[in-house]
Image: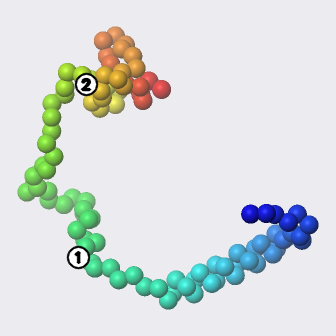
Amino acid sequence: MATDYDSPRKTDEDINEDSLQELQARRVDKGTSTIDVDPDEVAEGMELPGADLSGEELAVRVLPRQADEFTCSRCFLVHHRSQLAEQRKGQLVCKECAA
């Protein structure tokens, strides 16, 4: 988009007025639009603190650490050997923790 440098520039007051007018227009627009939300759908995705989860089962299959993986001694995450940054006193450190 081409810019006309000879045109009069807006002052700070003009910018503030424009912004105020835009905000007022947005407020009117927001009042007219409504969102229909099913409360059952919202409740499914929320977990309450202290909820009883004793009847829940783990739905993820957990694999033991593989031969080409290591556990970082700082973050305790399992990484692939390609993420190994250094070994200090027999402790393995990943690239993220070493940075």
Mark 2 or 1, nearer chain start: 1
Question: In this image, 7 relative to 50: left or right?
Answer: right
In the rendered image, residue 84, in percent from the top left (x then y), is placed at 36, 21
In the rendered image, residue 93, in percent from the top left (x then y), is placed at 36, 22
Say which amino acid is labelled 2: Glu
- Furthest-right residue in view? 6
Labelled pair 2, 1 in contact (Cβ < 8 Å) = no
Disc number placed over residue 90 in the picture, else none: none
Residue annotated with mark 1 = 40
Which residue: 59% across, 81% down? 26
Res 6 → quadrant: bottom right
Q: Secondary structure at mark 1?
A: helix
Residue annotated with mark 2 = 69
- Furthest-left residue in view? 55
How many numbered circles are shown? 2
In the displayed structure, 59 sits above or below 22; it is above
Which residue: 25% across, 24% down? 69
Q: Can residue 57 be seen by looking at this rendering?
A: yes
Q: Secondary structure at mark 2?
A: strand
Say which amino acid is labelled 1: Asp
If the image is split into quadrants, where does the N terminus sit? bottom right
- Furthest-bottom residue in view? 32
Question: In this image, 99 relative to 73: left or right?
Answer: right
